[in-house]
Image (tube, rainbow, N blue to C red):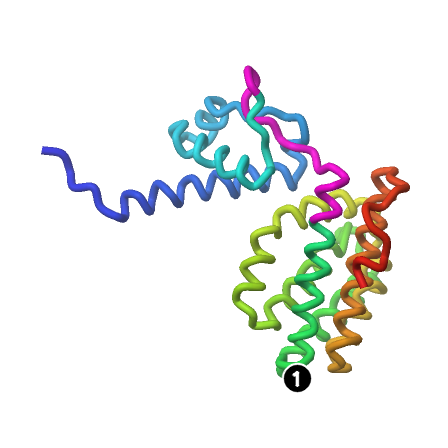
Amino acid sequence: MKDTITKQHFADKQNMSHDVIDFFKQQILSGQLNPGDRIVETKFARELGISQTPVREAVRQLSGEGIVTIVPNKGPVINELQTRDIYEIYSLRASIEGLAIRIATQIASDEAVEQLENFYEGMKLKEKEKNESVNSLLLDSWFIHQSIIQLSNHSRLIRTYESISFQIALVNRMLGSESSKQKEVEEHLELITALKERDPDKAELTMRKHIYRSYRECMELKGEEHLEHGENLWI
């Protein structure tokens, strides 16, 4: 007689495919996998020491997220972010993070804001020390944005943000090599100041302008002179 199939059996199978998804995303963010590269399921299953099933499930999920495309006679291929993708990611960020900081200015405790300010001061020290082991402050900047999202205490907003967090990180990877530590420090002071001033309207406008500036820089990096929409859309 066959062993009883429990709910845990399916949970373990699901968790394995989630682990494979995280693995592929890490490979993409680290540059081990790049746009145009194929995901050969048999190869990765062998390297990871697992069956092809969780790899195939992970690829299906990545396809649903728009990260890979299943090309006939070729298989799964890593997508390149197009101009439209970048516009949609940044414009959605402007709305989500604008709302997040608007809420945070009204409900975040003084202690929570002070903790984030202390983190920012540590970020400034890293820049002043000119520590060559610290190549970028992009992760510090990312932490500030994520913290503001969490300070909103808005569960659906947080989940929506998490659903596009990988795509945001992918765009940040493009900007990372061009963004100096000094620039990261200077540009995130305005967000800390906006939180401390507790003015919801001003804070939301500050965040929207902050995101728009990043969008414009990203498009310039890609050599795109035409922006999908002007600044009026964002603010």
Q: Classify residue 69 as left or right of residue 49.
A: right
Q: Say which residue appears at 71% left-offset and 42% top-offset.
A: 85
Task: Indicate the position of residue 91 as horizontal and vertical percent values.
Answer: 73, 54
Extent of the magenta region: 72-88
Q: In the rendered image of this protein, does residue 223 appear above or below residue 96?
A: above
Residue holding disc 1: 110
Q: Say which residue appears at 60% left-offset and 37% top-offset.
A: 67
Mark 1, residues whose alpha carbon is within 10 Å: few (<14), some, or many (≥20)?
Answer: few
Q: In the rendered image of this protein, does residue 188 appear above or below residue 31?
A: below
Quadrant in which residue 170 is drawn: top right
**Type of the residue with mark 1:** Asp
Q: Which residue extends farthest top? A: 73
Q: Classify residue 37 as left or right of residue 15.
A: right
Disc 1 is placed on an element classified as: helix
Q: Classify residue 31 as left or right of residue 19.
A: right
Q: Is residue 22 in the magenta section?
A: no
Quadrant in which residue 182 is drawn: bottom right
Q: Classify residue 27 as left or right of residue 180.
A: left
Task: Indicate the position of residue 24 as horizontal and vertical percent values.
Answer: 55, 37
Task: Indicate the position of residue 1 as horizontal and vertical percent values.
Answer: 9, 33
Task: Indicate the position of residue 164 as horizontal and vertical percent values.
Answer: 61, 51
